[in-house]
Amino acid sequence: MEHLARNPAPLTQVYHLMAEGMSFKVMVALRARRVEKWIKCVKRDYLENAPIKCVGLDCEFTNPREGDQRAAILQLSAVSENLVFQICRADEVPQALKEFLQDGSIRFCGAAIGKDVEKLSPYDIHITSAYDLQ
């Protein structure tokens, strides 16, 4: 009898990277509650007392040849904490994420992120303070 794995890939993976003397923590998540936890920790540890609140933002998209193109992966970065949220495969899009991205006190920055912001709208995500750095 052959054993069949139900879900061979873990729902959340955490990586610790060292590059050029800097340390980064990267959380790759499929579950809404892990995204909520990341947001809570980043707000508490980095954004709460910061005079200028800035979070890096980037998206990767689904293949446009397979139907309507939408955001497949949402990447957020604050200081050394990084989130890679596989939004198109997630169990749900958490309300905490929507509220976080609509927080006008946080600047969401990235290179050429106009299309990224646009492709998040089907998930009912509307970013109010996006800054294109390109």
Image: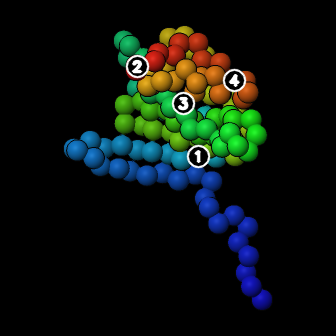
Q: Which residue is mark 2?
A: 133
Classify the position of the N terminus by image quarter: bottom right
x, y (%) of residue 32?
67, 39
x, y (%) of residue 105?
50, 11
Q: Which residue is mark 4?
A: 121
User: What's under tag 1, amino acid-wise?
Assistant: Ala
User: What's under tag 4, amino acid-wise?
Assistant: Ser
Crowding near the residue tagged with mark 1, few <14, some 14–19, many ≥20 C-alpha atoms within 10 Å: many
Q: How far is mark 2 from mark 3, CA to CA?
A: 26 Å
Q: Which residue shows up at 42% across the image and 37% down it?
A: 81
Closer mark to the observer between disc 1 and disc 4: 4
Q: Which residue is mark 3?
A: 40
Q: Which residue shows up at 59% across the image and 46% down it?
A: 29
Q: Which residue shows up at 61% across the image and 59% down it?
A: 10
Q: How far is mark 2 from mark 1, CA to CA?
A: 26 Å
User: What's under tag 3, amino acid-wise?
Assistant: Lys
Disc 1 element: strand
Front residue (pair 133, 48): 133
Crowding near the residue tagged with mark 2, few <14, some 14–19, many ≥20 C-alpha atoms within 10 Å: few
> Going from the N terminus, do you reach mark 1 or mark 4 first?
1
x, y (%) of residue 70?
68, 34
Q: Evaluate if marks 2 and 1 touch, with contact meaning CB atoms under 8 Å apart.
A: no
Vertical side of 105 occupied by 125: above or below = below
Q: Evaluate if marks 1 and 3 touch, with contact meaning CB atoms under 8 Å apart.
A: no
Residue placed furthest toward the front: 65
Q: Which residue is mark 1?
A: 29
Residue placed furthest toward the left: 21
